[in-house]
Image (tube, rainbow, N blue to C red):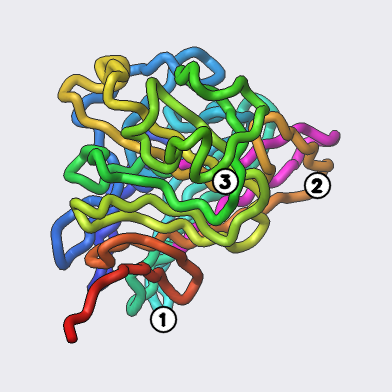
Amino acid sequence: MVENRFLELTFLPELGGRLHRAVIKSTGQNIFYQNPVIKPAPFGQRDWWLRVGGLEWVAPTEEHGYLEAFPWNLALETQRDGLVVRMTTVEQQRGFDVTATVWLRADEGRIATMLVTQNRTGSAQPLQMWMNAALAPAANRVGSATHFVVPDDQMIVHATEDRALPPPRARVGWTLHQNRDLSHPSAWNGYVGLFAARPTPFIGLYDPQADAGVAAVSSTGLAGAKVFAFSSNFDRRLFTNDGSDYAELWCGAQPTFWDDPPLDAGEQRVIAADWIPLQGLGDLATASDHGALACNVGQTGA
């Protein structure tokens, strides 16, 4: 565990080197989903995946990669302006060296992250890189008012149980599609995953009722963004035992899961993002490396 005066961060190096908890010290709220049990869920490339919660590092393939269930090496470094947590592993499928770095600076209420993959093999290898945050702003739940914020007018369908949506790779209007506001998971039928149609400066999730959320601000190398959540009628027993719930924000080095660019021998690929815990905004309109803003329309008396 590491902390500054704003945040307390807990890591699980034994389970994918994930950033497991990020607690806002003024409220005691963990911004990440935290599953009370750990059991395989029928998702991902292997047809099983551990939805533990927190922020996971995804490589070398699409979906959830192959690294979330294996131990990583962890090192802590103290710097003049804060703390650095660095986690490393060797990916066994294609031979990549993978390093995830988290900075917690002394006077900032944000989490700076970087994922670096190095190809030390003798030939080019296909590589996808993503950061995937499981979020639950309403006390380990996704509330009925929770919505995604993506500054785009179109999204690309990845996968869905919602039969009112078109098939994978098709585009839908964002936020409105056929008079339905797709930014609210409460309007969905089953699970839905959507990619941003173009690179975005940020993506976010906010629950106005809980008055809390998270923004992920793009930095180095980010070309893709994705949102994912479940509707109210999805059977959560597939991944937990207490009915708890989450929504996901993804930041990636490639636009979608169908893009698999090679990494040449001896080269490295880098992505970076800042994760900003939000509270007391009322709602989320936009975010940047300077912070986040809401747009609340009110009335004034004469």
Q: Write down the residue under mark 1.
A: 80
Earlier-in-chain disc, 1 versus 3: 1
Answer above or below: position of 292 versus 48: below
Looking at the image, residue 165 sits to the left or right of residue 5; the answer is right
Q: Residues within 10 Å of mark 3 (few under 14, many from 20)?
A: many
Earlier-in-chain disc, 2 versus 1: 1
Q: What's the distance in space between the residues labelled 1 and 3, CA to CA?
A: 33 Å
Q: Residues within 10 Å of mark 1 (few under 14, many from 20)?
A: few
The percent position of residue 86, horizontal first and vertical second, equals 47, 55
Q: Residues within 10 Å of mark 2 (few under 14, many from 20)?
A: few
| Residue type, mark 2 in image | Gly
Q: Which residues are magenta?
A: 112-132
In front of the other: 142 or 263: 142
Answer above or below: position of 267 versus 159: below
Q: Write down the residue under mark 3.
A: 225
Earlier-in-chain disc, 2 versus 3: 3
> Would you say residue 117 is visible in this rendering?
no
Identify the secondary structure beneath mark 3.
strand
Majority secondary structure of the magenta segment?
strand
Answer above or below: position of 17 versus 300: above
Residue at 26% from the left image edge and 39% from the top image edge: 142
Please state which of the two labelled residues, at mark 1 or mark 3, is closer to the viewer.
Answer: 3
Residues marked 2 and 1 touching at CB (< 8 Å): no
